Amino acid sequence: MNILYFGTVCDAKNYDNLLKGCKAKPSVAPLVFESSFLDGMKKNGAEMEIYSFPMVPTFPNCKLLRFGGFKEKLECGYECRWLYTVNLPVLKQLSRKLSGRRAIKSWCKKNRGDGLILTYSVPPFLVGDVLKYGKKYGVGTVAIIPDLLRDMYVNEKPSLLTRLKNLYIRPALKKQSGYDGYVYLTEAMAEVVAPDKPYTVMEGIALCEKDAREERLEKAFPYGIMYAGMLHEKYGIINLIDAFEALKREDAELWLFGDGSARAEIERRAAANPSIRYFGTVSRGEILEYEKKATLLINPRDPDEEFTQYSFPSKTVEYMLSGTPLITTKLRGIPDEYFGYTFASDGNSVAELKSLMEKCLSLAAEELCAFGKKACRFITEEKNSKKQALKVINFLKEVQYDA
């Protein structure tokens, strides 16, 4: 089976260099997910032609006025071509649409009736051509849905620009149910996107470059309790700070990484309490190093929030792979099998978070280390890239046969 893939994947080093002069820094979560997924596809021998539309801020937040149209080698071994992009409002989407359309038409003609188009998310500028030419040339179409398209701009402040962005995705929302199949991160997504279409669920995937089970992890002192990710109030960040301060422990610090709407409050609290350390936005490599030094990693999201049933936090797999124990709330999007390898809380109230942190910090270092390594073993053996990608490949074959 030949696969035409569209996503945001690219060489991580080239991407980091490109973003150095940018005012805004996109999340690296999609790049991490796609890199792991394509690593698994390569290990399973999948034949793929890959095109990328990397998440690069639009001018003037990025100084580049145009980029793309070149090939690069990905770490997994595949070659990837960047879609040609004029990096200005409106022209950005239009140039990518035209570049993507040429790629789709050319590939579909060569693989008529014997191939499949796979997209990461439902790209608003591309979905119409994916569905149109897939149907015209008898090629199957499948979308990986990491997040609901309707929630793409849910964390942005209300503004004219936000309204224009939501208008931009409206046609794609109407077309998103037109694919032949879907790969979701949670079961609940199917009811929102395409209730009557075939799907499989792949909630997480790990690229196991090093085995933390065999590493000797040098832990920091004072104890580090760490959160890295989007710093929005609705993700429970303020509750986490309040719970940490309620611990009143001189032998522990709270490490916070990232950016978001709660940043100003975090900076204020960090200035008033030296045990709260705000690192801002740092490289992924630095994040991974701090995860290994930390005593505990934590995800304090409120499980009662509706969006959690449509979300599997990408940090869950990353945290567990580090070998450092994870505290998480019992989010509806996380399968129950994960909770046997984490310290889980039913809610994210200040009292609940404080109680669980106290319990974990009371355990012996050896016990915490063994618990973290057990979680790492679960991820490396059950959620590794080759195993998870094979599940997707088998599903793609079913869709191609039925398309």
Image (cartoon, grey):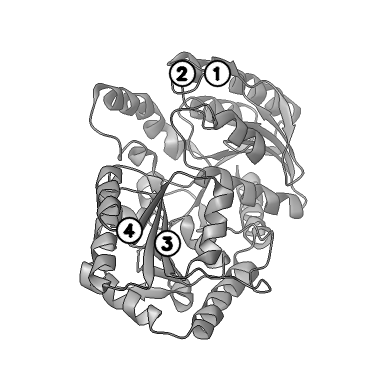
Mark closer to the observer (1, 3): 3
User: Given the image, on which type of amino acid does mark 3 rest?
Assistant: Met
Are circles 1 and 3 on residues that touch, CB within 8 Å? Answer: no
Count the marks.
Answer: 4
Are circles 4 and 1 on residues that touch, CB within 8 Å? Answer: no
Which structural element holds mark 3?
Answer: strand
Q: Give the spatial CA distance, label 3 vs label 2.
A: 34 Å
Circle 4 is placed at which residue position? 274
User: Given the image, on which type of amino acid does mark 1 rest?
Assistant: Leu
User: Given the image, on which type of amino acid does mark 4 rest?
Assistant: Pro
Q: Which numbered marker is on residue 7?
A: none
Q: Give the spatial CA distance, label 1 vs label 2.
A: 7 Å
Give whichever of discs 1 and 2 has the lower sequence position.
2
In what quadrant of the picture does the C terminus appear? top right
Q: Position of residue 108 (x, y in %)?
A: 68, 28
Which structural element holds mark 2?
Answer: loop
Asked if residue 259 lies left or right of residue 201, the reply is left
Residue 135 or 103: which is nearer the viewer?
103
Q: Position of residue 362 (x, y in %)?
A: 38, 84
Give whichever of discs 4 and 3 has the lower sequence position.
3
Circle 2 is placed at which residue position? 59
Residue 348 visible in the snapshot: no
Q: Position of residue 151 (x, y in %)?
A: 34, 41
Give whichever of discs 1 and 3 has the lower sequence position.
1
Are circles 2 and 4 on residues that touch, CB within 8 Å? Answer: no
Q: Please rate how many residues cluster around mark 1, counting C-alpha atoms within 10 Å: few if below 14, some from 14 to 19, many from 20.
A: some
Mark closer to the observer (4, 3): 4
Circle 3 is placed at which residue position? 226
Vertically, is 97 above or below 177? Answer: above
Q: Please rate how many residues cluster around mark 3, counting C-alpha atoms within 10 Å: few if below 14, some from 14 to 19, many from 20.
A: many
Residue at image x 32%, y 58%?
274
User: Given the image, on which type of amino acid does mark 2 rest?
Assistant: Phe
